[in-house]
Image (cartoon, rainbow, N blue to C red):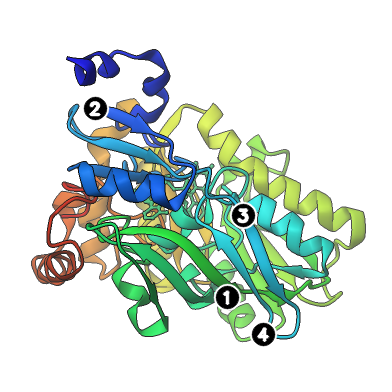
Amino acid sequence: MMKLQKNFNGANKHYSRDASHYKGNALDVVHPKSIEELRKIVKTTNYLVGRGGGSGLSGGAVPLAGRDTVINLLQFNKINNFDKERKTVEVGCGVILEGLQDYLNFRGFEFPVNPFSRKIATIGGMIATNAVSSRVGKYGRMAQWIKWIDVMDCQGAISRKGVTEISDYSGMEGTTGIIVRACLKVVSKIKRSATIVPITNLIEMIEIVENLKRDKTVSMIDFCDEIISEGIGLEKKYHLFIEYENDLGLLKGPEYGEFLKTLDTIYSFVLGNGCIAIEDPKIMLSKLVHVTKWFREKNVLVFGHLSAGVLYVCFKEEQFSEIPVLRKLIKRLGGMITFSHGIGVLKRDFVEFNDKKILENVKKRTDPLNKFNVGKML
Ligand SMILES: Cc1cc2nc3c(=O)[nH]c(=O)nc-3n(C[C@H](O)[C@H](O)[C@H](O)COP(=O)(O)OP(=O)(O)OC[C@H]3O[C@@H](n4cnc5c(N)ncnc54)[C@H](O)[C@@H]3O)c2cc1C
């Protein structure tokens, strides 16, 4: 009876969604403040969903059908043991990325994976989804920046996982254990500049991108379509956003600061424009012209990280029937249907048979009691 009442508790409503449109219903929401409290919950509760900032876009942190207990991990928020010489820092899973960046910037350092969601996303969530950012071409994914993680298993025991075991947790979207703490590699703060290039011809844009990809000083090659460009105050054309780790870019100092702010307005523009589902396929650049024809035909907005061929394709509710069509098109073109937002609930049915087998084996080995995020990914 007690549990049932919690279903209707307004405070728990907040935990019934992440940043995707998918809605669930929590049996309970718990807010552990210590490892001991977390251990007690894990040992005594069956269906558990770890939640960081709730900025996920695939329903990964959403509790399913009144069955799941959500563990709010935001109170594991300590940053310590910063080591200037080794360039490492230890971080609780509930630390918000922007807080970590402030901590590091103050000491002359930064964390190179810096997603658009940095004001909300936690380190635990970023590790679980193996997040990327606009600098993916140069700095890769989250997992590459981890020295070790401490993980709580389904029996409440904590063990330290080094580089060879990271893939059992990073990218497994909380299905294999709760990541409680991590030691991350950091880099010295870099002085950057940038250039925004308007594009009229997509084939030319691909040529520019291929050349930029060979330049080691280029840390970002993002783009957006004409509609988004106009919405964020640029000319109604495609635009490339190029960032340099030297002063080669035209926008330096405060103008470079404005460049970063402009990039940050892309997400708010697409959300404000009624797009409530954002797909994240990865394709070969040579296929961009082909998929762009489809985007124009279907009237969907698109932006992304061209350094890695990652596209963010934005759908309004009335366009949802086109989402499976896009996924099939991406598969036909040899691309990946999800690169950065994860599988969660929303893309579960699109996991290939062989990938499913691999995920199932990792799940059985790491979570034999089947407690964590049951019904996600698989
Ligand atoms: C405006 C906006 C911009 C975005 N930009 C980007 C981007 O540039 N790049 C990118 O990669 N993503 C982006 N995302 C998606 C999202 O921010 C990332 O997936 C992020 O890593 C999720 O972090 P979180 O703390 O919010 O995780 P949550 O949404 O809370 O959880 C995500 C998944 O991780 C699991 N999880 C969370 N914490 C833990 C833990 N400690 N241990 C085990 N499992 C855990 C959850 O169960 C869930 O499956 C964006 C989202 C929004 C809304």
Quarter holding residue 230:
top right
Q: Earlier in the sequence, mark 4 or mark 3?
A: 3
Quarter of the image with the C terminus is bottom left
Q: Badge 3, how many Cα within 10 Å: few under 14, some, many 20+? A: few
Left/right of residue 76 with respect to residue 84 in the rendered view: left
Question: Which of labels 4 and 2 is toward the front?
Answer: 2
Q: Which residue is mark 1?
A: 139
What type is the residue that disc 2 sits on?
Leu
Asked if residue 23 can be seen in this view, the reply is no
What's the residue at 47%, 76% (across, down)? 148
Q: Which residue is mark 2?
A: 27
Whether 188 is drawn above or below 175: the answer is below
Q: Badge 4, how many Cα within 10 Å: few under 14, some, many 20+? A: few
Q: Earlier in the sequence, mark 1 or mark 2?
A: 2
Whether 185 is drawn above or below 341: the answer is below
Picture coordinates of residue 174, whole percent (x, y) = 31, 55
What type is the residue that disc 3 sits on?
Lys
Q: Earlier in the sequence, mark 4 or mark 1?
A: 1
What type is the residue that disc 1 sits on?
Tyr
Q: Circles 4 and 3: CB distance less than 8 Å?
A: no
